[in-house]
Image (cartoon, helix red, strand yellow):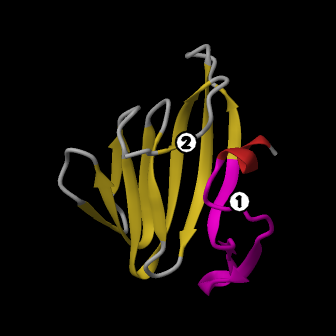
Amino acid sequence: MRLAALLSVPLLSGCASLPAAGGQAILTQPQGVNLVLEGAIEAAPGYHLVMGDLVMPAGGVIPRHTHSGEEFLYVMGGSATVMRQGEPDLVLQAGQGVRIPAGMVHGGLAGPEGMRGVASWIVKDGQPLRTAATD
């Protein structure tokens, strides 16, 4: 899996389902960034989409980094603070999201109850998913 080599946050495999009210299963994932899908974008040659299911423990940190393309983050549970260079910190609660422009240095911190979210990254072909910030 190419994504595992690109992430500084561990990519963990495996998942489980727990029964929910009404008999429907709820997907549970291990902590980290769990690959959901990756594929070419026909409408944007030279780019591909990567989607991840993010599971962070309370106080979990995503170090400062950049992306070659845009990132879209949606928080499904818990909360997270997104730190973006040149912008005020943004606290996201369940049901809120943010778009992070290409090249913007940013990082994150999970809230006291952790965070479960989904992220989508537009990545230039041949570029890593993310690059650690050097400053």
Seen in the picture, residue 96 relative to 85 is either above or below; the reply is: below
Q: Give the residue number, with chain letter if any, for mark 2.
A: 130
Q: Is residue 92 magenta?
A: no
Asked if residue 43 lies left or right of residue 37, the reply is left
Q: Position of residue 114 (x, y in %)?
A: 46, 78
The residue shown at (60%, 59%) is: 53
Residue range highlighted in magenta: 7-36
Q: Position of residue 98 (x, y in %)?
A: 33, 49
- The circle on residue 121 is none
Q: Give the residue number, with chain letter if any, for mark 1.
A: 11
In depth, the one of 106 and 118 nearer the eye is: 106
Asked if residue 46 lies left or right of residue 17, the reply is left
Q: Which amino acid, by three-letter code, is at mark 2?
A: Arg
Badge nearest the viewer, 1 or 2: 2
Q: Is residue 27 magenta?
A: yes
In depth, the one of 64 and 95 nearer the eye is: 64
Q: Position of residue 16 (x, y in %)?
A: 77, 75
Residue that sits furthest to the front in the current view: 135
| Earlier-in-chain disc, 1 versus 2 | 1
The residue shown at (24%, 59%) is: 90
Neighbourhood count class around disc 2 (C-alpha, 10 Å): few under 14, some 14–19, many 20 upward: some
Mark 1 falls on what kind of element? loop
The residue shown at (44%, 34%) is: 70
Quadrant location, the N terminus: top right
Q: Which amino acid, by three-letter code, is at mark 1?
A: Leu
Which image quarter: residue 12? Answer: bottom right
Q: CA distance from mark 1 to mark 2?
A: 13 Å
